[in-house]
Amino acid sequence: MFDQADPDKLFSYYTTMQVRIQDRYVGLANYCLQFLILSYIVFGIFIFSRGYLEFESAKGAIASHIRGDVLSISRGRAGSRYFSAEEITYPGLENGNVFVTTRQNVRRQRRAVCEDSMRPCVVDSDCTTVMDGKCSENGFCLEPSWCDIDDTPEIYTLDVGDIYIWIKSSIQFLQLARDRIYSTESNHPYPEDGFNAFTVREILMLCEPVPVRFEELASLVLPLRCCTFGIVMCRGSTADPQSRHAGLMSSSIP
């Protein structure tokens, strides 16, 4: 079989053949295409997209501790009330956020048949038919609901400027250092004024613009973020006065 093989085919090999195309238009298109590809690699991938870097979503946690209390006298129905730190920061709806109550309306209610101010209506079908709800002359559903016992609620304005907030945070990069956790407790394990501990008044003074009156606390929303401390101010909204908290209506600062 080997003896019958063609020597030229047996000892043949492959080589690269280079062709020179002498055409200005084809050559110009070739160099333009190479320039575009090179520009995309340098500017698009390396400079703008930073393709030489590896990114990851870090995992972190924030814990906050509140210290302080407030005694307030009602501006509505006569009454006074002591608010502990747990009551001032209730409810804790989000991890890492602190809700500070600045105004609270307390209504005494009971279950009865009355007009539900939260349910406007035009016809009886707009009300709860299962409870035989009727549309009253005032345009509200007349049905079993939480009814106010007193005409005027207790209105408390809380002076929370001296409430003390201690913030602790930690972050971990699993791809860079799986066995290491970066935490503010490493070098600052205890509260330090101006570093990881602030009063509500000090935080508000960082707002732009600074609140003119301290009563404007009731309309501010202040998120505290890990690593970079930033203040964002916007208008907040009050809670539902007919909620399950027995008619509690409060304004909070997260």
Image (cartoon, rainbow, N blue to C red):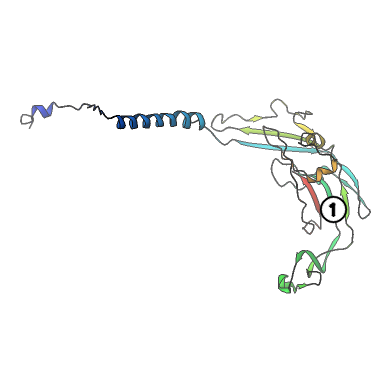
| Residue in view at x 79 percent, y 33 percent | 198
The x, y position of residue 103, in whole percent, is 84, 48
What is the total number of numbered labels drawn onto the structure image? 1
Q: Quadrant of residue 121?
A: bottom right
- 59 left or right, relative to 11: right
Vertical order, 236 against 5 (above or below): below
Decide: few, some or many residues near mark 1? Use Cα within 10 Å; few <14, some 14-19, many ≥20. some
Residue 171 visible? The answer is yes
Residue type beneath disc 1: Asn
Vertical order, 193 against 64 (above or below): above
Which residue is the site of mark 1?
Answer: 105
Residue 53 visible? The answer is no
Quarter of the rendering occupied by the C terminus: top right
The x, y position of residue 200, in whole percent, is 80, 37
Q: Quadrant of residue 246?
A: bottom right
The x, y position of residue 233, in whole percent, is 74, 41
Callout 1: SS: strand
| Residue in view at x 76 percent, y 50 percent | 237
Vertical order, 8 against 141 (above or below): above
Relative to the observer, which residue lies in front, 71 or 137? 137
Name of the residue lying farthest toward the right: 78
- 123 left or right, relative to 69: left
The x, y position of residue 45, in whole percent, is 47, 31
Name of the residue lying farthest toward the left: 4
Quarter of the rendering occupied by the N terminus: top left
